[in-house]
Image (cartoon, rainbow, N blue to C red):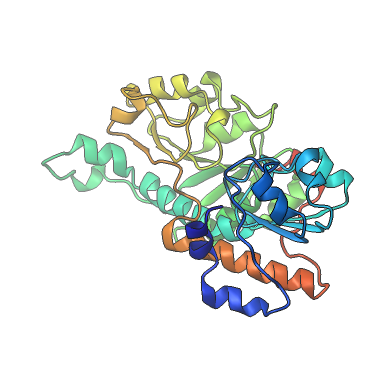
Amino acid sequence: MGAEVVERVFPPGLRARLGRSVRLAPVPLTGPLDGPGAAEVLAGTEILVTGWSCPPLTPQVLDSAPRLRAVVHAAGSVRPLVTDAVWERGLLVSSAADANAGPVVAFTLAAVAFAAKNALATAARYAGAWPRFHERSGADGCTVGVIGASRIGRRVIEALRADPAGYRVLLCDPYVDEAGAARLGAELTDLAGLCRRSAVVSVHAPELPETRGLLSAGMLRLIPDGGTLINTARGSLVDTEALAAECAGGRLSAFLDVTEPEPLPAGHPLLALPNVLVTPHIAGAQGTEVERLGRFAVEEVERFVAGRELAGRTVRGDLSRVA
């Protein structure tokens, strides 16, 4: 994490809150963490604040940080960062995933509203002319299928259920039972049932070996004509070429903030289709929103120093179910 990133994520006003008892020293985390420069700083580090580009905390890196007690990740997933050695050494790990979730939820809800009104396909079909009233779509009573009751998925469900449009929400998640889904305000179903019944399918499941290709060609074919797929999770969960074929034929539309591969190669069909919007992985905290992550990390360090429970604590068992 370079100095300019530290200033963006941890502006002086926020850093001052930690007081003189905590000294912040930016470490060049984009380089080798076992290099001489980093080792000097790590030798006296008790709390390591990391960002998106932090390399893995290998045993060799941790050997250079004998006083390290906590890793506070000022970003989302800690999976690329945390190794077995982190848990074996009993280090506390925190993630700002909750703070990062807010922008993703807002992005998803905007995509759902556009999808419910069939905005992409309508704009493409009626370029230069307005659709007649009976040809227009509305959101009221629209059925939205949510794949994954993750921290983001749950907040999306909550927002949809509170919306005056009266969205009907279906949920597919192997870790949620019918009673749990009912408490969220959703109807539990399997993946095939969700695809068959949803006008809008929104993906919020983690990337795991068992979720790769989850939305296969067969599953995509089950989504009703005119349906829309929204993916703000991970591109590997969707069969990219099968989705391209469905969208090229005009049967489905898509809002894709993540793809497989990422980014898509120049000239890929999904980039040119008028009923597909591909954005460059921007649903999470961007620009001015990044300060939310810094604020969360600073408050987390405050909690740690005060001996309080970490709000974003992540334990080893969480990694099998999070992005």
Q: Give the camera-side residue of 33 and 143.
A: 33
Q: Residue at x 74, y 52 (%)?
A: 180
**Quadrant, the C terminus:** top right
Q: Residue at x 53, y 36 (%)?
A: 197
List the single residue furthest toward the left.
128
Q: Position of residue 100 (x, y in %)?
A: 56, 56
Q: Can see residue 83?
A: no
State whether residue 152 is above or below residue 273. Answer: below
Q: Position of residue 147 (x, y in %)?
A: 60, 40
State whether residue 240 is above or below residue 306. Answer: above
Residue 37 in the figure: left or right of residue 2: right
Q: Give the camera-side residue of 209 and 29.
A: 29
Q: Quadrant of residue 305?
A: bottom right
Q: Position of residue 70 (x, y in %)?
A: 78, 58
Q: Give the camera-side residue of 146 and 225.
A: 146
Q: Quadrant of residue 71?
A: bottom right
Q: Can see residue 301?
A: yes
Q: Give the camera-side residue of 298 and 97.
A: 298
Q: Position of residue 110 (x, y in %)?
A: 41, 53
Q: Quadrant of residue 41?
A: bottom right
Q: Exactly how many numbered labels are in the figure?
A: 0
State whether residue 152 is above or below residue 301. Answer: above
Q: Residue at x 48, y 37 (%)?
A: 258
